[in-house]
Amino acid sequence: MHNQVNAAFSATGALAKHIDGFNAREAQLDMAKAVTDIIEQSGALVVEAGTGTGKTYAYLVPALLSGKKVVLSTGTKNLQEQLYYRDLPTVVKALASPLQLALLKGRSNYLCLFRLEQHYNHVPMQDDKLIQDLSLIKKWSAETQTGDIGELGYIAEDSKALPYVTSTTDNCLGKECPVYEDCHLLKARKKAQAADVVVVNHHLFFADLALKDTGFGELLPNMDVIIFDEAHQLPDIASDYFGEHVSSRLLLDLCRDIDVACKTELRDHPQLAKVAEKLALLVKDWRLQFSADSTRGNWREAYQQLPMQTALNRVSESIEMLYLVLKSSLGRSEQIDNVFERLVQIKLRLTKLTDMQQDGVSLWYETTRLHVSLHLTPLSIADKFNAIVAADERSWVFTSATLSVNNGFSHYTAQMGLQQAKTLLLESPFNYAEQSLLCVPRFMPEPHQPTMAKTLIDIACQLIAANNGRCFFLFTSHRMLQMVAKQLPDLIRQPVLVQGTTGKRLLLDQFVKLKNAVLLGTGSFWEGVDVRGDTLSCVIIDKLPFASPDEPLLQARSENCVRQGKDPFFEVQLPQAVITLKQGVGRLIRDVTDRGVMVICDNRLVTKPYGEIFLTSLPAMSRTRSLDDAITFLKQIEQENES
């Protein structure tokens, strides 16, 4: 296969002939060869491919030429669609590949015909927008071939109607469903099982791998090659799925389904409706024990409070009562049988999540405005995941632009249980020293000092004026973002776009259209955002992205580290922060012709010994401590663009 791969990437090969402007890079070919080796021999390969390497083609070409069954897993639905609708067809066409392709999303992305019918006929609440959206979905349901909710561009992503017309693993009736044969999810899974290449996302992969869902358990055994792109996201996603969780939403959905059943099939069973109604009220009372804000916290600590225990005990007693009443109604309705099974699952999970004596797990809670969820997350998934990788003669590829810390992979391979994996570190082909400048401004206050916000705004105003906007301002906390968002628009003449005011994709489209905007963002704008050319030539980062020490999972991992006699800062916090910073810095230079300035407003990069680990892990940009140098560099870019 090596000869075929070399030929495909050559100057006169299939890719050069069919893709305008394609030039193979040395690093891209090195990665393609390493992927080819692992596909031929089986085993695991971990590859960091710097921005601009062309890693997508480097794994797609060997995967398609191998003729083997392949799963491609990406970080988000957006990247999944980009791979399926843009990159894959391009390479398939260039290689004239006869392979069957399929896109498979999680079940919440597919219309459930049974639930649509149920809630269209018995609207859950009197809400004009909900009724209007249900009518639009009903009309679309007669036209759609795939049932993919993504087709509903005219309905808001957070529409109240969507949970009523999609299923969860808990409320899906499976083979007992009256419209099972027409199920869109079932059809998508059958197509995936028959395909040679299936594109999924990490959440779907691990949901099914952890046996929380059906369908993929039948798909995975047929697959020979599994490739994870954006693999730096895997440790946290995998940890979540190897854990357990229970939520007020699950319980309220269950009560709502009982209510619908009592209005249709079980009109003669008013007691059941009353018991479900009481449980729903007690669940809402339990939510009131937590802060009104959306937050995360340590569940072991929260559970120590007597009012919390009382509220949850009342929920548990009500669950017991509902269990007994449902048991006496089994066999009368498929939906009630399904609700009973779900209740049994919730009872078991709740028992696990109130066992405070367990070791090796983090117990934490998360609240939204209306709901609370409890989570049990294993502190390490290394052994479990290693067993999965070692179980069969398969090929596994883990790739991202940000996997290494201090030029090594030991942090990642230890987290994922991949100590036996082959590793490859490929530098970006971009000339960072000439294309970019890294500035750590002098005289910055310490991140926690009250003068920090004012200093940040002063620095930002100077850079924005010099660059006429065209700037990403990335924050490590929503609090600082909001403080800056309040003041900045009055101090500059360029438009300011703020994360959260509208959808991410819409904000990015506005940023590109405006050509002189400043975009303020947190977490989700640090990665997976690709703005090329002059539209973005300055990125400001407020401080090093250390996770909050009271973040429950980090807290538990740190305590575990101490028990093992290790340093939690160097073992847990630092590597995580380095990878996050690399993602943020990666927003600046996206192409060979891009130029720009990266400003990190955190003295610790220079004053603390660990600053060197961050700097070693970043691209080889020219460096300065002078803000004036950064401003001069930006003005120079402006002049060159005009001439």
Image: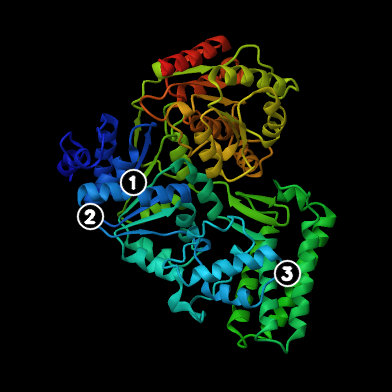
Residue 126: mark in rendering: 3
* Relative height, residue 504 to residue 438 (above, below): below
Q: Residues within 10 Å of mark 1 (few under 14, many from 20)?
A: some
CA separation, marks 1 and 3? Answer: 45 Å
Q: Which residue, as the protein is rendered here, is positioned at the far front? A: 643
Q: In this orientation, does residue 33 appear?
A: yes
Mark whose residue sits in front, 1 or 3: 3
Identify residue for label 2. 67
Mark 3 residue element: loop
271 displayed left or right of 257: right
Q: Amino acid at mark 2?
A: Gly
Identify residue for label 1. 87
Mark 1 residue element: helix
> As rendered, which of 585 and 272 lies closer to the eye?
585
The x, y position of residue 507, in whole percent, is 56, 40
Residue 100: mark in rendering: none
Q: Along the polypeptide, which appears first: circle 1 or circle 2?
A: 2
Rendered image quadrant of residue 356: bottom right
Q: Along the polypeptide, which appears first: circle 2 or circle 3?
A: 2
Q: Which residue is rendered at x = 73% and y = 76% of the image?
A: 322
> As rendered, which of 485 and 190 lies closer to the eye?
485
Q: Which residue is rendered at x = 54% and y = 76% of the image?
A: 114
* Relative height, residue 152 to residue 44 (above, below): below
Q: Amino acid at mark 3?
A: Gln
